[in-house]
Image: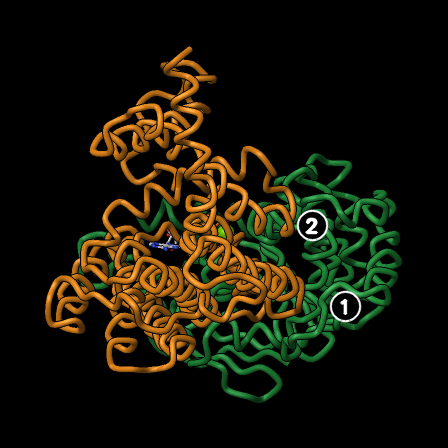
Chain colours: A orange, B green
Amino acid sequence: MEFLSSTFTSYMALVPVTLSQSLILAFVVMGIMIPFRTLHFPDLTSEGAYPLGGCVCGVLIAAGVNPALAIVAALLCGFLAGCCTALIHLRFRIHTLLAGILMMTMLYSINLRIMGKSNLSIFGSDSVYNWAPFVTPGFPASKIIIAGIIGAGVFLALNWFFKTEKGTALRAVGSNPAMAEAQGISVWVSTIVGVGLASAFSATSGALMVQSQGFADVNMGLGILINGLAALMIGEAVVGKQSVFRQLLAPFVGAIIYYQLVSLCLAAGMPPPDLKLATGLFVLAMLALPSLKRGRGAGGTPAREKFRE
Amino acid sequence: MLEIRSARKVFYAGQADEKVALDNLDLTLQTGEFGVVIGSNGAGKSTMLNAISGALPLDSGQILINGDDVTNTPVHTRATRIARVFQDPMLGTAASMTVAENMLLAELRSTKRTLARGLNAKRLADYKERLSALGLGLENRLETKVELLSGGQRQSLSLIMAVGGSPDLLLLDEHTAALDPRTADLVMQATVRAVDNLKLTTLMVTHNMQHAVDYGHRVIMLDAGRVKLEIGGAEKANVTVAKLVEHFAVKTDAMMLGA
Ligand SMILES: Nc1ncnc2c1ncn2[C@@H]1O[C@H](COP(=O)(O)OP(=O)(O)OP(=O)(O)O)[C@@H](O)[C@H]1O
Ligand SMILES: [Mg+2]
C-alpha cells in the first residue's frame, strides 16, 4: 500500500512534464510512421535526424538566431538527410534499413562537426515556449501548449495532404510501387519527398526538444527509434490504422500513452538503464504476436529477405 | 499508333544461359487496331509488353507511340499514354487503398496531380456509374479496400481503371488467365465492349485460342522473340482454333527436328 501510494504521488507529479515531452516526441513517431506505414520504406534515419535537428537548432540559438527560424532550419536539414537516405536506396539499390543505418552513422560525425563539441548548453536563451499565451514561460504548460499547437497543425495539414491528388499518389507508391508507376507516378520523386518529409519531422522534434531541455547533445537520439516504434504500435493498437485519419492520429496518441507508461515504470522504481531493454522487449513482443498466434512451424523458416518491416 | 522497330532484348548477355527474349522484333499497330498476341511460353510476349510500357529497357531498337519516340522515357512518363492490365490481379491495383482511390489514381494517370482534394462528389458519382457497367456491384463498394475484393473483382476494377480516359495504347497481358471461367468471360466481355466503344489501340496477350479467334482485328504470333505469323483482314475472320493450334504444332516439330 505504501509502495502504491508513493508510486502514485511521484508519477502524478511527473504527468505534466511527461505530457510536454511526449507531445514533442510525437513528431519523431510521425517521422517513423510515415516511412514504415505509408511508404513501406522501413527507415532508421530518424535516429540521426532527431539529433541533427537538435544540434542545428542548438547552434543557431546559441548564435542568437530566432528560435522559430532555428526550428525551420533544423526541419530543412532533416528533410535533406531523409532525401539522402531515399536516394542511397533508390540509386544504389541498398536495402532501406542499411541505407538508414549508413545515414545515421554519417550523421553522427556531421552532428559533432555542426556543434564542434558533443554537448552545448543554451540554457536561458529565448525559446518558442516563451511565446505561449496565458501561461508563465518555463513551465510544462507552456510546452504543452506550443507543442500541442504545432502538433495539431501538422496533424490537420497531413490529414488534408494525404487526401489531395498528390497525397493519394504518394500513398499509392507505398501501397504498390509498380502500380503507382504504371499510373504515371514517379516512384523516385515520391519516395524522396516522402522520406525527406518524415526525417524533417524527426529533426523538428529534436529542435523542439533542445529548446525544451535547454541543451543539445550528439547522443540525444540514442534509442529514439525503438521508443518511437513502441509508441507507434501502442497508438495503432488504441486508435487503429484503417483510415488516413486514424493512422495519422496513432503517433500522437501512442506517444502520449507510451511516455506516461515509461514515467509510471520509473516512478515504480525501475532503474532507468533497464528502460531500453524493457522497450525492446515490448516492441519484440508486439512484432512477435502475430506469429505466436499462428503457431510455430507453419510456413517453415522464413526467407532471409522476407522479414516484415 | 504503335511502332516497334527492330527491338532487341537479351537477358544474361554473354553468359552461359544467355537468352534472346526479343530478336529484332518489328511490329506496327494502327490507331484503333486491336491486336491479339499468341505464342508459346517464353516466346517473348511479356517481354515485348514490358518493353512497350518501359518496364524493361531495350538493348537496341525503338518504340514509337503516335509517331513519338518513347524508347528512352521512364515508365511513369509513358504511363500518360499507355494503360496496362497485368496477369496478376495483385499487380494492377493498390491493395491497401479503396476502390475509389484506385479509380482516382487511374483517372490522374495522364494529368498533372494537384493539391486539390482527390475524391470529390463529382468524381465519386462518375466512378459509381463506370463501375456499375460491370454488373459486379463494385459501385456500392467504393469505400472498400481493394485487398478485400476477389481476384476477379480486382481484375475487373483494373480493366475499368485502364480503359478510363481513353489511353493511346492499352496493353493486356493474359489479363483473364488467373480468373475462373465465368469471371474470365465477364472480364473479357467488358474488355471487348470498352475497346470497341472507345476504339482503343490494343495489344492483348492470350493463351486462349478461342479468344484469339473471336476477338481482335489481327492475330500476331510470337516465337523466339520475333513475329512468326500475322493473320489479319478476311483471313482473320475465317481462322479457326484448329488452324492456330497447327502453327504451334509445326513449331514443336521444327524444334524437334532442329534439335
Ligand atoms: N527478368 C528476366 N530475367 C531473365 N530472363 C527473363 C526475364 N524475363 C523474361 N526472361 C526470359 O525471356 C524469355 C521470354 O520471356 P517472356 O516472359 O517474355 O515470355 P512469354 O511469351 O510472356 O511467356 P508466357 O507465355 O509463359 O508468359 C524467357 O525465356 C524468359 O525466361
Ligand atoms: Mg508472359
| Residue carrying label 2 | B98
Residue at point 25%, 68% (across, down): A122
Q: Residues within 10 Å of mark 2 (few under 14, many from 20)?
A: many
| Residue carrying label 1 | B234
Q: Nearer the viewer, mark 2 or mark 1?
A: 2
Residue at point 30%, 40% (across, down): A305
Q: CA distance from mark 2 to mark 1?
A: 45 Å
Image quarter where the N terminus of chain B lies is bottom right
Q: Is residue A245 above or below residue A50?
A: above
Q: Residues within 10 Å of mark 1 (few under 14, many from 20)?
A: few
Q: Residue A61 lies in what quarter of the image?
A: bottom left
Residue at point 75%, 39% (across, down): B183
Please provide percent x and percent y for residue A267: 35, 29
Could you say whether the residue bearing mark 1 is in a helix, strand or loop?
helix
Residue B143: give its label.
none
Let me know if residue A163 appears in the view: yes
The earlier-in-sequence mark between 2 and 1 is 2
| Disc 2: residue Cβ within 8 A of ligand 2's nearest atom | no
| Disc 1: residue Cβ within 8 A of ligand 1's nearest atom | no
Please provide percent x and percent y for residue A105: 17, 58
- Do badges 2 and 1 share one subunit? yes
Could you say whether the residue bearing mark 2 is in a helix, strand or loop?
loop
